[in-house]
Image: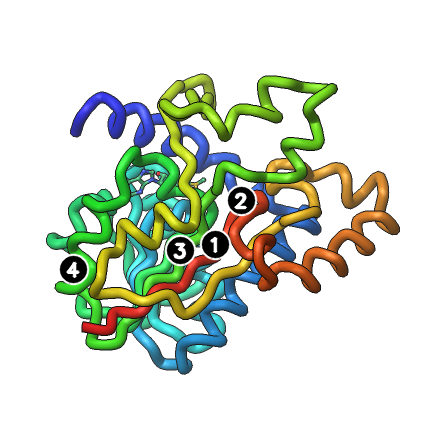
Amino acid sequence: MDSHSTSVSEAFSLKSFVYDQFGENHANLTRMRERVYAAVTRHLPTGSHLLEINAGTGLDAFNIVQRGYSVHATDLSDGMIDAIHEKIKMHRLQSQLTAERLSFTDLDQVQNGRFDAVYSNFGGLNCVEDLRPVTQHLPKILKPGGLAIWVIMPPVCPWEMGLIFKDWRVATRRFRPNGVMANVESVEFRTWYFTAAQTMQAFGPQFECVGLEGLSVVTPTADNKTFAVRRPGLFNRLVQIDEAISTVWPFNRIGDFFILTMKLVS
Ligand SMILES: C[S@@+](CC[C@H](N)C(=O)[O-])C[C@H]1O[C@@H](n2cnc3c(N)ncnc32)[C@H](O)[C@@H]1O
């Protein structure tokens, strides 16, 4: 592993011990995850066999198998893979959920293929500078007509930009051309932000876009747990606006994340 991957793996292995706890009683994060599950269930019939990359502790894999899918969950960090194995054991999910430690840049080595879809949630793919080492393997591991459903952090995030007078660094960080240092559990590593157009381009001509929506366009970012508690009325109003505009241009490509669905067509 190169030094960047070693740092990412170390950081998220440390994070794995507290990761699920942060999501408890987090109304906005729960809502955002539900939007991602809706994208999966809208595009794929139950019974589909899915590959999750950068799966974290397996929260999404667990929720998606509850909805009738089988999932092979992969991640770079040992700590995250241990957490997925714990969920498999605790909930006796051996027949629906499997786990493997694997970088998403090595998808040609994945076990348990081929897949109806490859999904990635909440910015794991923002840990690489170039998405092509990931996309290059997809035609080999997807079934014909297979999908990639990727949740990626774009440069334009209105909520963060609204902090311009309060925290200039946060408000402008996504626009830095050489990426931004992230600090996770006191381990630093570089991250990068991608526009929807850059992400689509990384897929190349074998794929076409079949879905694009903004995720948290006007609502708080995923790391904000308090706004929904302190201002529930305003939060609910913003959620209504968010739901109404998320698929409309240009809001379908901005926000804390966008959800891009690409289909393998040739
Ligand atoms: C912000 S967490 C998201 C986890 C999960 N998808 C979720 O929604 O909770 C980012 C994850 O990406 C993983 N990751 C980062 N770089 C990776 C790589 N090259 N290959 C596989 N996983 C990677 C990290 O280990 C971490 O678990």
- In this rendered view, identify the residue nearer to me: 15 or 258: 258
Considering the numbered disc 3 on the image, is that residue within a helix, a strand or a loop? strand
Whole-angstrom CA distance, mark 2 to mark 1, is 8 Å
* Placement of 223 over or under 187, stated as above or below: below
Amino acid carrying mark 1 in the image: Leu
* Mark 2 and mark 1 residues within 8 Å of each other at the beta carbon: yes
Whole-angstrom CA distance, mark 3 to mark 2, is 21 Å
Label 1 near ligand 1 (CB < 8 Å): yes
* Residue 200 locus on image (x, y percent): 34, 54
Considering the numbered disc 4 on the image, is that residue within a helix, a strand or a loop? loop
* Mark 1 and mark 3 residues within 8 Å of each other at the beta carbon: no
Query: Which image quarter has ligand 1?
Result: top left
Residue underneath mark 3? 150
Whole-angstrom CA distance, mark 1 to mark 3, is 16 Å
Point out the frontmost of discs 3 and 4: 3
The image's mark for residue 243 is none
Number of residues whose C-alpha sits closer than 10 Å to that of mark 1, classed few (under 14), some (14–19) or many (20 or more):
some
Number of residues whose C-alpha sits closer than 10 Å to that of mark 4, classed few (under 14), some (14–19) or many (20 or more):
some
